[in-house]
């Protein structure tokens, strides 16, 4: 029987915000870009990294309650670990491409200092140890260090899904909170090697917002609240958002010398995902959850539907688009080094980057819609 290619799912709120996160990550990963000032992290204690990981938890919940719900525990683990391995392969590939780009740029532009960009120097000074570290994820390039976190979270996904089966949030959240508290109170993180240090995104801490996304996306999650409760949640979130915007605008951050122990509980630390960042991220999600549906029902939708479809297309193909965005952001950094940081250069970087990301998403869906090879052969004369 001929396989009928599945049509891509219709634009929706989750894919829209995931696409939004991908675009803002791309912009924020080109330091100094004029348009970087327009991203929401300039008015927030949290940024697109929290949004991306939260939505990854949401996506896992939809998968756990949907396609993999009937599977046995071993089959579920096999299915989810396959996704984790795909992310691992993607991380390895884009890291090697980034290393090649830095090496080529250093030769073409006679700029050997570019070999030191983004923690890449160990690859050229200690190639044996560094390549072992790249395979083990213990050596990570700057701006290429969020997928290693995602790899760890996806390898842990079967445990999360099975805990959810066993007891739901009542079992999963206390364990997640306990691990988070352990990391913050004792400052525990995964080590890096061969360069001494620790992971920029600490999986022991960041698993909490992943699990929150998983737990809050169920039938009683933000998106399922009735209008009255949603309004109440937005009112509660408002002072948190105002305080976060003020702190971001004045560049306020608690001085580690003057906060009590354990200090990570009171800092705005991104590596350990301090409580202030999680609280502000949750306030953002509470404030904006459901607005996609309101916009879709408004007269303005005829103007908003095209950009919403574009963002949703990016979100549907998040892994491929994220890999492209990572490479494009490094290309943008090199372009700004060569041509300078002018408004015209920055605008061209944004336009080309967004267009290529869209092309990657479109090509991913076009490829998925191709007939199966066996079906194509059966129609040949």
Image (spheres, rainbow, N blue to C red):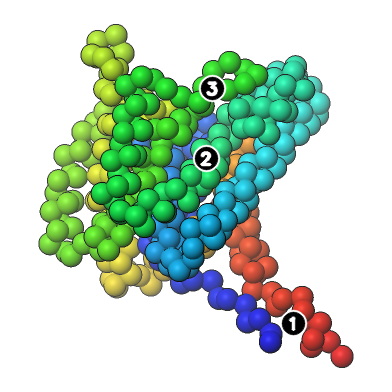
Quadrant including the N terminus:
bottom right
Sequence order check: which comes first, mark 1 or mark 2? Answer: 2
Secondary structure, mark 3, is strand
Q: Is residue 210 above or below residue 103?
A: below
Q: Earlier in the sequence, mark 3 or mark 2?
A: 2
Residue 162 seen in the current view: yes
Badge 3 local density, few (<14 within 10 Å), some, or many (20+)?
Answer: some
The residue drawn where x is 44% and y is 40% is 49
Tell me the tag on residue 359.
none
Q: Between marks 3 and 2, how big is the CA–CA gap?
A: 14 Å
Q: Residue 191: which numbered mark, if any?
A: 3
Q: Position of residue 36 (x, y in %)?
A: 46, 37
Residue in front for this viewpoint, 232 or 294 = 232
Nearer mark to the viewer, of 1 and 3: 3
Determine the image quadrant of residue 106.
top right
Q: Quadrant of residue 256?
A: top left
As displayed, is residue 232 above or below residue 246?
A: below
Q: On screen, 12 above or below 149?
A: below
Judged from this view, the residue extending furthest toward the right is 381
Q: Secondary structure at mark 2?
A: helix
Q: What element does badge 1 sit on?
A: helix
Q: Earlier in the sequence, mark 1 or mark 3?
A: 3
The C terminus appears in which quarter of the rendering? bottom right
Label ID, residue 375: 1
Q: Residue, x 45% and y 68% (percent of image)?
A: 70
Q: Residue at x 42, y 54 (%)?
A: 161
Q: Farthest residue in the bottom direction?
A: 381
Furthest residue in direction top, as rendered:
257
- Do labels 1 and 2 touch, CB within 8 Å? no
Please name whichever residue, 181 or 223, is drawn nearer the observer in this view of the structure: 181
**Of tags 1 and 2, which is closer to the observer?**
2
């Amino acid at each position: 029987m001929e396989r009928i290619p599945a049509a891509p799912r219709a634009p929706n709120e989750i894919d829209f915000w995931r696409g939004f996160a991908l675009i803002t990550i791309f912009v924020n990963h080109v330091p100094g870009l004029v348009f970087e000032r327009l991203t929401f992290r300039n008015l927030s204690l949290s940024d697109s990294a929290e949004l991306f990981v939260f939505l990854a938890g949401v996506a896992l919940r939809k998968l756990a309650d949907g396609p993999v719900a009937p599977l046995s525990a071993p089959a579920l683990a096999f299915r989810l670990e396959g996704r984790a391995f795909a992310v691992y392969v993607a991380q390895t590939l884009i890291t090697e491409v980034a290393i090649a780009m830095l090496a080529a740029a250093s030769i073409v532009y006679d700029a050997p200092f570019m070999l030191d960009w983004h923690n890449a120097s160990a690859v050229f000074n200690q190639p044996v140890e560094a390549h072992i570290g790249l395979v083990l994820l213990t050596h990570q390039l700057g701006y290429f260090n969020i997928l290693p976190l995602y790899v760890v979270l996806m390898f842990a996904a079967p445990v999360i899904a099975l805990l959810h089966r066993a007891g739901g949030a009542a079992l999963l959240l206390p364990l997640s909170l306990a691990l988070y508290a352990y990391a913050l109170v004792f400052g525990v993180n995964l080590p890096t090697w061969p360069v001494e240090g620790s992971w920029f995104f600490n999986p022991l801490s960041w698993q909490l917002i992943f699990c929150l996304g998983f737990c809050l996306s169920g039938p009683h999650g933000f998106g399922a609240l009735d209008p009255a409760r949603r309004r109440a949640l937005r009112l509660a979130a408002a002072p948190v958002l105002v305080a976060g915007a003020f702190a971001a605008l004045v560049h306020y951050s608690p001085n580690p010398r003057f906060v009590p122990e354990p200090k990570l509980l009171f800092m705005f630390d991104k590596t350990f995902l301090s409580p202030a960042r999680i609280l502000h991220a949750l306030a953002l999600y509470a404030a904006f959850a459901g607005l996609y549906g309101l916009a879709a029902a408004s007269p303005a939708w005829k103007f908003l539907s095209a950009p919403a479809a574009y963002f949703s297309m990016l979100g549907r193909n998040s892994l491929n688009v994220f890999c492209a965005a990572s490479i494009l952001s490094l290309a943008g950094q090199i372009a700004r080094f060569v041509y300078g940081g002018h408004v015209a250069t920055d605008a061209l970087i944004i336009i080309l980057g967004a267009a290529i990301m869209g092309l990657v998403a479109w090509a991913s869906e076009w490829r998925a819609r191709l007939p199966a090879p066996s079906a194509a052969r059966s129609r040949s004369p």
